[in-house]
């Protein structure tokens, strides 16, 4: 079934249940949709995959085998306008995507033989603004060339995990009852949707040493394989639509690290990912890109 057919079924169901709610059993909408990578719904999955992308926040350096670095990173989540959030039902339904203004997670890097290093980052399942992440990210990195004042490095990275939240039927709409303005889809309870943010990628970067500061620039290419599971109930209809999409994105980041103490480094980074979508069938591509600020404090334990 196409997204247009799904929307027609939902509209029909809303009308029928509004007219005679007592005469109908509660139907379940179970669709499997493989979305074009430029569909509005796919854009939302691309956007939050980019938000959680495990960048190096610097260029790989040579760590002795057994050395440990612990860090805490955080990044901004730009506020999305109502138009930018209108991505459901092929760009006709506004979703609740402004859950939190920031995203953060701890990360640990350990030095391995052959100048390799392994980074593990985890966003724990702490609910913030109605969203609960559980995301595990890994990266394997190595400097490729080292000179006195600059170096070149590469990273392979990936992520698995989910973010759960009331994206399609937010709690405030469900509480509005049958108010057609505050609750246009007549949500009966807040939804329990799940976004699976799965990706892997390759990053190449260069850094320059300027005293205690180390400016750097990096670029990455990513393969995304996300999913979205709807778990919503509105006006008697149970929506269990499952959506998947696949595609490639690229991103760039520029920042500077600063050696604040002997074992403490502070990093600030600007991240940019160009993201496109087509709002209507047969329409033209438009950009809704991600540009955000990322910060990290890293302490070398040994």
Image: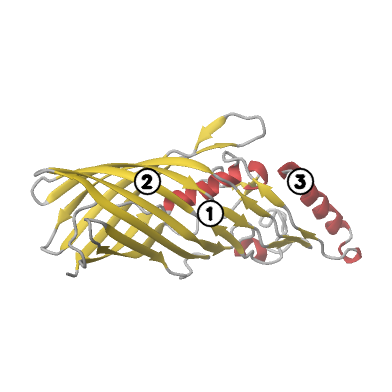
Residue 224: % across, % down: 50, 48
Q: Which residue is mark 2?
A: 202
Q: Kindly report the distance in space between the C-alpha atoms of the residues bearing marks 2 and 1.
A: 28 Å
Q: Which mark is residue 97?
A: 1
Q: Which mark is residue 83?
A: none
Residue 272: % across, % down: 37, 42
Q: Which mark is residue 1?
A: 3
Q: Can you tell which quarter of the image residue 52 is in?
A: bottom left
Question: Residue visible at 24% across and 52% down?
Answer: 60
Q: Is residue 5 above or below residue 96?
A: above
Q: Kindly report the distance in space between the C-alpha atoms of the residues bearing marks 3 and 2.
A: 36 Å
Residue 176: % across, % down: 67, 63
| Front label number (2 vs 1) | 2
Q: Is label 1 in a helix, a strand or a loop?
A: loop
Question: Residue visible at 23% across and 60% down?
Answer: 113
Q: Is residue 96 left or right of residue 240?
A: left
Q: Are marks 2 and 1 in contact (CB under 8 Å)?
A: no
Q: Earlier along the polypeptide chain: callout 3 or callout 1?
A: 3
Q: Kindly report the distance in space between the C-alpha atoms of the residues bearing marks 3 and 1.
A: 25 Å
Residue 205: % across, % down: 27, 43
Residue 1 visible here: yes
Question: Residue visible at 89% across and 60% down?
Answer: 20
Q: Earlier along the polypeptide chain: callout 2 or callout 1?
A: 1
Question: Residue visible at 68% across and 57% down?
Answer: 183
Q: Is residue 5 above or below residue 300?
A: above
Q: Earlier along the polypeptide chain: callout 3 or callout 2?
A: 3
Q: Residue furthest front?
A: 114
Q: Quadrant of the C terminus?
A: bottom left
Question: Neighbour class for label 3 at 10 Å: few (<14), some, many (≥20)?
Answer: few
Q: Can you tell which quarter of the image residue 283 is in?
A: top right
């Amino acid at each position: 079934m196409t997204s247009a057919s799904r929307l027609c079924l939902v509209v029909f169901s809303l009308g029928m249940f509004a007219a005679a709610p007592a005469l109908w059993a509660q139907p379940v909408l179970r669709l499997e949709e493989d979305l074009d990578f430029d569909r509005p719904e796919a854009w939302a999955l691309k956007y939050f995959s980019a938000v959680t992308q495990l960048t190096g926040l610097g260029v790989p350096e040579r760590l002795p085998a057994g050395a440990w670095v612990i860090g805490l990173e955080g990044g901004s989540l730009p506020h999305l306008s109502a138009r930018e959030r209108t991505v459901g039902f092929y760009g006709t339904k506004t979703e609740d995507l402004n859950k939190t203004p920031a995203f953060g997670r701890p990360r640990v890097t350990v030095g391995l033989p052959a100048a390799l290093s392994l980074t593990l980052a985890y966003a724990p399942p702490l609910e913030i603004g109605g969203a609960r992440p559980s995301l595990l990210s890994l990266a394997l990195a190595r400097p490729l060339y080292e000179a006195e004042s600059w170096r070149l490095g590469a990273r392979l990275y990936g992520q698995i995990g989910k973010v759960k939240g009331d994206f399609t039927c937010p709690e405030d709409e469900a509480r509005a009852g049958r108010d057609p303005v505050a609750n246009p889809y007549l949500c009966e309870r807040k939804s329990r949707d799940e976004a699976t943010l799965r990706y892997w990628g390759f990053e190449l970067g260069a850094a320059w040493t300027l005293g205690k500061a180390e400016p750097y620039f990096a670029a990455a290419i990513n393969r995304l394989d996300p999913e979205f599971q709807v778990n919503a109930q509105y006006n008697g209809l149970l929506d269990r639509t499952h959506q998947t999409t696949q595609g490639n994105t690229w991103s760039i980041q520029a920042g500077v690290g600063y050696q604040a103490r002997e074992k403490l480094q502070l990093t600030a980074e600007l991240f940019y990912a160009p993201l496109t979508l087509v709002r209507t069938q047969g329409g033209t591509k438009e950009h809704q890109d991600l540009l955000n600020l990322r910060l990290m404090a890293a302490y070398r334990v040994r």
